[in-house]
Image (cartoon, rainbow, N blue to C red):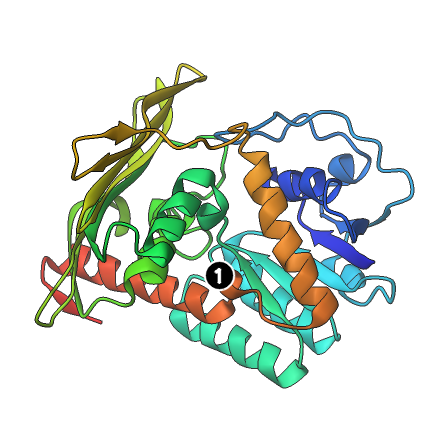
Amino acid sequence: MVRVGIAGIGFMGMIHYLSYAKVRGAKVVAMADCDRKKLSGDWRSIKGNFGPRGKRMDLKGIRTYDQTDDLLHDPEVDLVDVCLPPALHRDVTIAALRAGKHVFCEKPIALQARDARQMVAAAERAGRQLCVGHVLPYFPEYSCIRDLADSGKYGRLMGGSFKRVVSNPLWIANYFDADVIGGPMYDLHIHDAHFIRLMFGMPDRIFSAGRLQDDVAKYFTTQFLYDGNQPVAVTATSGVIDQQGRSFTQGFEIHFERATVLFDFAVIRDKPVALSPLTVLDESGTAARPRLGSGDPLRAFEAELKDVTRAARQNRPAGMLDGTLARDAVVLCRKQLQSLQSGRVVRI
């Protein structure tokens, strides 16, 4: 049994808590937060842009701490799940690793590439696993793309376009603070940056254009430029709009040699809308819609945490959740911000 301690009871801390309950071989035994109301089980203030709202929870049998350091040194905790603001990720992760714990850190791994590198190095020195919560590849639409690419059924990947846009998340304090959360570049787009890195590798150059808010990316479109004889064409759009009627949208159009795969989803007036369910357009003219299961987004987190639990139990890397991939996603975000601020193409 992998005994888990969750540091931070916000939206992701709640999602992880609910998901661990469905993962065989894992058990949440401790939680830490500076809000004593949340430690008492009153999670009614918690909300996000998908999934359930917070409610009163029965935390009987779970040890609670108002100091994160006490959780890190709890001898009954094997894995520390870090769901704190990004600015705290480096220090808490490194302290947990030094205390002999495995770590599952929510994305982004950090706001600076140098911090991410230090976290990866700390895990290597400690001989413990550092997994980072890039859950996107576990969602069925994105998992399908991975499977099609791995199978070679439609030939090689030629490129694609991605989008991920939210209404202004007014319930998140310091959202546009570059030193705390970093805005949608690090809270939102980093999902697609990680997926692009996973599927296409690191680009050679980047060009971003869009809008800034206090020198923080607010809304932007990026070209990921790959050099070579057969370059791929990859773009991504992400950011925040100020209209609250559409709280979330995500989608992609992926090009293979012999197929194009489409997906477009939104939450409009708090209701999920499948603008374009996952559809595979092949060279024969067929438009097929693969079966994706229940569509419950929490299933992706369950799958993710199964891999985290396995990595901790076996003390082996968790593949897509590896810290080096998460580090590279931060590098891509930093380079995009640099391009957006300068108006120039930036070399990686």
Identified at 16% across, 39% down, the residue is: 283
Residue flagged by tag 1: what amino acid is it?
Met
Of residue 57 and residue 252, the one placed in the foreground of this image is 252
Identified at 10% across, 64% down, the residue is: 345
**Callout 1: helix, strand or loop?**
helix
Is residue 237 visible in this depiction of the protein?
no
Identified at 44% across, 16% down, the residue is: 271
Q: In which quarter of the image is residue 287?
A: top left
Hey, which residue is sitting farthest bottom in the picture?
Answer: 125
Image height of 79 relative to 246, above or below: below
Rendered location of residue 129, percent (x, y): 63, 71
Identified at 21% across, 41% down, the residue is: 260
Rendered location of residue 33, percent (x, y): 72, 48
Rendered location of residue 78, percent (x, y): 78, 64
Q: Tell me the residue that label 1 is attached to.
A: 320
Image height of 109 relative to 19, above or below: below
**Could you tell me which quadrant the C terminus lies in?**
bottom left
Is residue 117 visible in this depiction of the protein?
yes
Image height of 79 relative to 238, above or below: below
Q: Residues within 10 Å of mark 1 (few under 14, many from 20)?
A: many
